[in-house]
Image (spheres, grey):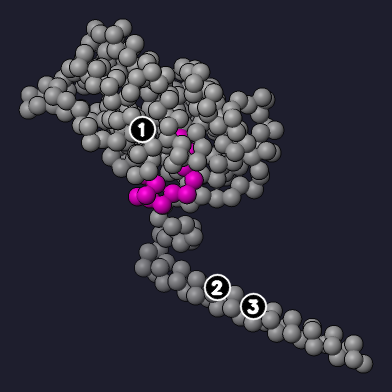
């Protein structure tokens, strides 16, 4: 008799708690339903998913671990491949270098060739990308050699338009479709990168960090804006810090081919080195994951982020 009474009391207690919980859940559901209904009345085109996601992208927890993701690839390269794969899958923001990453050439080298000073500028570019010269020194030296006018840059872009790297357009499309925000962070020139951003449907003002060339009233070269974060060595981590603080991103990934891109971790949680245009051994040795084809990154996004 004692056991039966005790058992009944326990069951009654559980039922009461369950009832209270159900009431709370129903109340919350009612409030949400009421809110949705009110907003739908104000804006019939509003989708329910608009309410479930904040203004900026949010990181998510992958349903599969990085260790499991690695199994989908044959001998991937990197110092922490599983971590990089999982971070990419869970990221809310992915930042790309532009030269030799988003495009299959160095923009400043294209401009230098167009102006007949290709060999000298290419040597300085290579030294900067491999970490042998401070970036601001290489930037100043290259621009001093070129002294490009606004008109000459526009003519260069018209006559020899920059070429996207194979697979990058599809990758960025998939990243955006999965709710991730995409930025271009480059030591190159804004005047040359903004047209690339527009092709990729990336906001050329808000989502591009690059160097600004200053011209006089006649469009002749004056200088570059030293206030741009990417005009200095360690400029990319500064740019990513600005992006993170302005948007509240939790998990950022940097993708690029050069030593300056590797510097972006931190604040990036993971650095993915890209060698599809040029393989730089220092970058390959430090990258969490090193790839030569954007289809590898796209595989992660398509498989684990939709």
In the rendered image, the quadrant that contains the N terminus is bottom right
* Residue range corresponding to the magenta coloring: 243-254
Q: Which residue occupies 28% across, 25% down? A: 136
Instruction: Inspect this view and state whether residue 175 appears.
Output: no
Q: Residue at x 47, y 57 (%)?
A: 53
> Would residue 174 appear left or right of 110 to someone viewing this image?
right
Q: Which residue in the protein does label 1 denote?
A: 234
Give the percent coordinates (x, y) of residue 92.
Answer: 48, 46
The number of callouts visible is 3
Vertical order, 189 against 126 (above or below) = below
Secondary structure, mark 2, is helix
Please report whichever mark, 3 or 1, sits nearer to the chain's N-terminal start.
3
| Residue 217 found in image quarter | top left
Q: Which residue is the site of mark 3?
A: 22
Question: Is residue 99 found left or right of 212 in the rendered image?
Answer: right
Mark 2 lies on residue:
29
Q: Nearer the viewer, mark 1 or mark 2?
A: 1
Q: Residues within 10 Å of mark 1 (few under 14, many from 20)?
A: some
Contact, CB < 8 Å: mark 1 with mark 2? no
Query: What quarter of the picture does the C terminus occupy?
Result: top right
């Amino acid at each position: 008799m004692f056991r039966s009474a005790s058992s009944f009391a326990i069951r009654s207690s559980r039922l009461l708690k369950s009832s209270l919980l159900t009431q709370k859940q129903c109340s919350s559901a009612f409030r949400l339903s009421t809110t949705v209904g009110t907003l739908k009345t104000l804006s019939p085109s509003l989708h329910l998913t608009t309410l479930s996601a904040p203004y900026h992208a949010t990181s998510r927890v992958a349903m599969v671990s990085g260790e499991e993701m690695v199994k989908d690839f044959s001998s991937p390269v990197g110092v922490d491949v599983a971590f990089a794969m999982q971070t990419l899958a869970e990221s809310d923001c992915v930042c790309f270098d532009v030269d030799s990453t988003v495009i299959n050439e160095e923009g400043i080298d294209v401009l230098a060739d167009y102006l007949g000073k290709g060999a000298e500028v290419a040597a300085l570019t290579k030294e900067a990308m491999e970490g042998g010269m401070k970036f601001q020194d290489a930037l100043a030296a290259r621009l001093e050699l070129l002294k490009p006018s606004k008109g000459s840059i526009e003519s260069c872009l018209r006559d020899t338009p920059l070429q996207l790297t194979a697979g990058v357009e599809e990758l960025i499309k998939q990243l955006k479709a999965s709710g991730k925000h995409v930025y271009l962070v480059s030591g190159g020139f804004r005047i040359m990168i903004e047209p690339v951003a527009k092709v990729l449907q990336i906001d050329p003002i808000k989502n591009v960090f690059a160097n600004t060339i200053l011209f006089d009233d006649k469009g002749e070269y004056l200088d570059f804006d030293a206030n741009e974060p990417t005009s200095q060595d360690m400029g990319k981590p500064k740019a990513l810090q600005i992006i993170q603080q302005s948007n509240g991103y939790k998990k950022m990934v940097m993708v690029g081919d050069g030593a300056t891109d590797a510097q972006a971790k931190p604040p990036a949680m993971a650095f993915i080195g890209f060698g599809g245009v040029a393989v730089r051994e220092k970058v390959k040795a430090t990258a969490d994951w090193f790839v030569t084809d954007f289809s590898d990154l796209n595989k992660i996004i398509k498989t684990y982020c939709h």
